[in-house]
Image: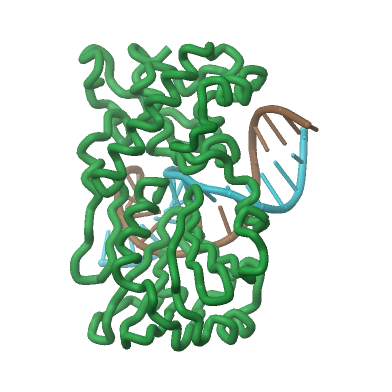
Chain colours: A green, B brown, C cyan
Amino acid sequence: MPELPEVTTVINTLKKTIVLKRIVNVTINYEKILKNINKKTFVTLCKNQIIFDIKRLGKNIILVLSNYYLIVHLRMEGKFYYVDNKTKINYKHALAIFDLSDKNYLIFYDTRRFGTFYFYSKEKEIKNLTVLQKIGLEPWDKRLTTKYFYEKIKNRNIKIKTLLLRQDIIAGIGNIYADEILHKSNISPLRSCKYINKSECSTIIKNTKSILRNAISLGGTTVFSYNSANGISGKFQQKLQVYNKSGKLCNNCNIARINKIKLNGRGTHYCENCQR
DNA sequence: CAGTTCGCCTGGGGGC
DNA sequence: TGCCCCCAGGCGAACT
């Protein structure tokens, strides 16, 4: 599942390939990905738009076009492929195909069909776009301090992992990194926010920054690819301490085995010995 | 209002 | 081998 580091890697790759290309045509094979516009209007408005820039906000990918913003969320399995016309694609999962001015194609590929497109006129400020309004602070925002975090969580009755997954406090953390951050912080995912002290808040913030930064430098975790011939796998996979490690000996204490439970419907991995 | 559960999807895996 | 059922999960909607 693409989280902040994976989305960053996707954007870095797309920047090298599609920026300054013109959209010649668009084919939408699954209209439900379009959340705030119908297919016919979307196709008409996209034609002849130039892709000027690609930005990220939380887990959202923002394609800055001549006159519009196209905001893409990959959700679980969304991928972008940049391919030439010789590349064979399983069109069953090619939900959107952009014909580009360089004769190549940008394909939005999503087997589970959870990904979303929002389309807005650029006349609106990015921060005022409905889909982005609930996005909280980026991990490296100077306003993300221990004090900010402590004030946000101190009276809450929800479990700390549930809070980390919310996008309106810190943006960009998903299920993999939430588990990893809490393991490195020696805090149980089941602990209620109201029992987390300032010092622990400081640890969580520090580890959020370091884990996400390290993951970005390694290209992320989720396996994804940009053309059908060769998949690129993020190297952070090898650094995971708890995610998908249930039954394995904890690397930190070397005593307990990683436990897997369900927390609010999400698979949750942690060490009962290290994380209290 | 805060917190929890549901529903959207489909490939893959386990059980038989 | 084939069929059924369940699971994975981000996030908005609907619920308590």
- Is residue A214 found left or right of A51 in the rendered image? left
Q: Return the x and y of residue A219 as percentages of the image width and height.
A: 26, 49
Q: Return the x and y of residue A53 as percentages of the image width and height.
A: 44, 67
Residue at image coords 19%, 71%: A229
Q: Return the x and y of residue A76 as percentages of the image width and height.
A: 44, 53
- Is residue A194 found left or right of A1 in the rendered image? right
Total numbered labels placed on residues in the image: 0
Res. A157 image quadrant: top right
Residue at image coords 25%, 49%: A234
Measured along the vertical axis of the image, is residue A135 above or below residue A250?
below
Residue at image coords 46%, 54%: A56
Q: Quadrant of the C terminus of chain A?
A: top left
Residue at image coords 58%, 76%: A67
Res. A158 image quadrant: top right
